[in-house]
Amino acid sequence: MTTNGWIQIALYCAVVLALVKPLGAYMTRVFTGERTFLSPVLAPIERGLYRVAGIDARQEQTWLAYAGGMIVFNLLGFVLLYAILRLQAALPYNPADQSAVAPDLAFNTATSFVTNTNWQSYGGETTLSYLSQMLGLTHQNFVSAASGIAVAVALIRGFARASTKTLGSFWVDMTRATLYVLLPVCIVFTLVLVSQGMPQTLGAYVDATTLEGAKQTIAVGPVASQVAIKMLGTNGGGFFNANAAHPFENPTALSNFLQMISIFVIGAALTNVFGRMVGDERQGWAILAAMGLLFVAGVAVTYWAEANATGVLSQLGLTGGNMEGKETRFGIAASALFAVITTAASCGAVNAMHDSFTALGGLIPLLNMQLGEVIIGGVGAGLYGMLIFVIVAIFVAGLMVGRTPEYLGKKIEAKEVKMAMLGILCLPLMMLGFTALATVVPAGLAGPANAGPHGFSEILYAYTSAAANNGSAFGGLTANTLFYNTTLAIGMLVGRFFVKIPVLAIAGSLAAKKTLPASAGTFPTHGGLFVGLLVGVVLIMGGLTFFPSLALGPIVEHFAGAAGQTFSTGG
């Protein structure tokens, strides 16, 4: 580890924190319907969209109607994207003459981008046309991110409102998230990325002759516009197979830093939106503090493991750190930081191969996802995921003192706790259940490239990434098969909608309750004690659930590596 590496990490944290309050204030104005500096330009467009769609912006919805609108919208998005992929060969903007995507791969890909997972069992430049990338994937990057933000805002209203049945309008929240938040930032971000050397063109692939005289076809396309929203919306799907390690998808150290900032900025700022809308900014800062503690701890462990070349690398005397699978233009610190960021948020973009990390370095990205990706998390998904844990933590605190648990003046009762547990438990069911299946059936065992615990980690990482709606891959797993495409898609659907629907049910229940005044027995939820309790609940629940699987994978691999044993292909 170096001073320069720690300075990069500290600078990153400082920039994210500096952006939380101004962006949080802006988004609060957007979702409360107040005027913003963009209103003169965007308000007429917003009203026009409502007229075309037949939406009354003043008509609010119950939680059931809100959930119904969300499900219908995502279902239609799935159908559209699936059709584009299957008909790709007959559609325009296909300069490389890409063929139609196979049915099982199209099903997996459509599910992946609709659920904001962006898992990719294919190489983008060798599989998809420009139209599929733009109209299919980039479009879903916007609306799946906006859908997550909308659900988070609805849950915030559940805490903020009292004695009401409505949570706002899904159509209005999604429109405003796209129009006022995602689109303006992405336009500016795209231009910045182009300035760094990222392609943005509809021209054909470029033929080049190397110095040795060989012919090479270089893939290009409308890359910058997709990368901007893939990062800002914590989508993560790469235009190219190598994702953010590709020089056209992440050309410079500056583009790398800005992409890392964009992954966290909305998720972090939503905690400030929460504090503002419930009338106490300290509540948002407390939640962000819990997220921040978990994040910094993860970065420290991953950076230490990669910089010190633990395990078998130390036995070989490699004291310079583990550079396998990493880009030299980013180095160990930026690669370790990126890995923790992308798995703390449900992004999934990668600038290094996680399969090549040390056992302990690869453990942290895996654990980040297994905790439900509540460490900042995806746009919207991180906040509502952490608020589920808040409900459990408050319930535990109530049990310890023998008092009915309360949060922000709302009694936390059986219904909220049951819905919270449903949202929490559906994730390990998908992650561990499908991993167990894949390790015993021939179709699953045919996937991993490595034997032993490392091969097990490849399978576990894939199903964890899918159910957590992350989309990053450990690498080394052949996932473009009927078995993996189908089971991973099921994991994505459950991980997205079996969390969203309970969250909206909680929001509806809370909004209908009266707000109780604080008393001498009220547990303060803005101080260090609450932050510690919340972190403890997240870690204990994650540890109890996932420690056995981690022990079979990266933990045993670490100890085996320290003894000089490796797990290469076929060994």
Image (tube, rainbow, N blue to C red):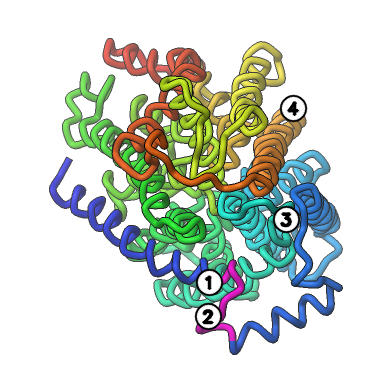
- Residue 541, percent from left and from top: 48, 23
Q: Residue at 72% across / 29% down in the picture? A: 487
| Residue 36 numbered tag | 2
Q: Provide the residue span drawn in magenta.
A: 30-39
Image quadrant in which you'd find residue 91? bottom right
Of helix, strand and loop, which mostly describes the magenta segment? Answer: loop
* Residue in the foreground of this view, choosing between 156 and 544: 156
Q: Amino acid at mark 1?
A: Arg
Per the image, label 3 sits on a secondary structure element best described as loop
Q: Amino acid at mark 4?
A: Phe
Q: Residue at 28% across / 32% down in the picture? A: 301
Q: Amino acid at mark 2?
A: Thr
Give the labeled residue for mark 3.
166
Q: Is residue 257 left or right of residue 506?
A: left
Work out whether mark 3 precedes mark 4 in sequence or the reverse, and give the earlier one. Answer: 3
Q: Say if mark 2 contacts mark 1, CB within 8 Å.
A: yes
Give the labeled residue for mark 1.
29
Work out whether mark 1 precedes mark 3 in sequence or the reverse, and give the earlier one. Answer: 1
Q: Residues within 10 Å of mark 1 (few under 14, many from 20)?
A: some
Work out whether mark 2 precedes mark 4 in sequence or the reverse, and give the earlier one. Answer: 2
Q: Looking at the image, how many numbered discs can be counted on the residues?
A: 4
* Residue in the foreground of this view, choosing between 293 and 419: 419
Give the labeled residue for mark 4.
483
Q: Is residue 506 above or below residue 83?
A: above
Q: Is residue 166 above or below residue 307?
A: below
Per the image, label 2 sits on a secondary structure element best described as loop
Per the image, label 4 sits on a secondary structure element best described as helix
Q: Is residue 33 magenta?
A: yes
For marks 3 and 2, give the CA distance: 24 Å
Q: From the viewer's perspective, is the residue at label 3 or at label 2 nearer?
A: 3
Q: From the viewer's perspective, is the residue at label 2 or at label 4 nearer?
A: 2
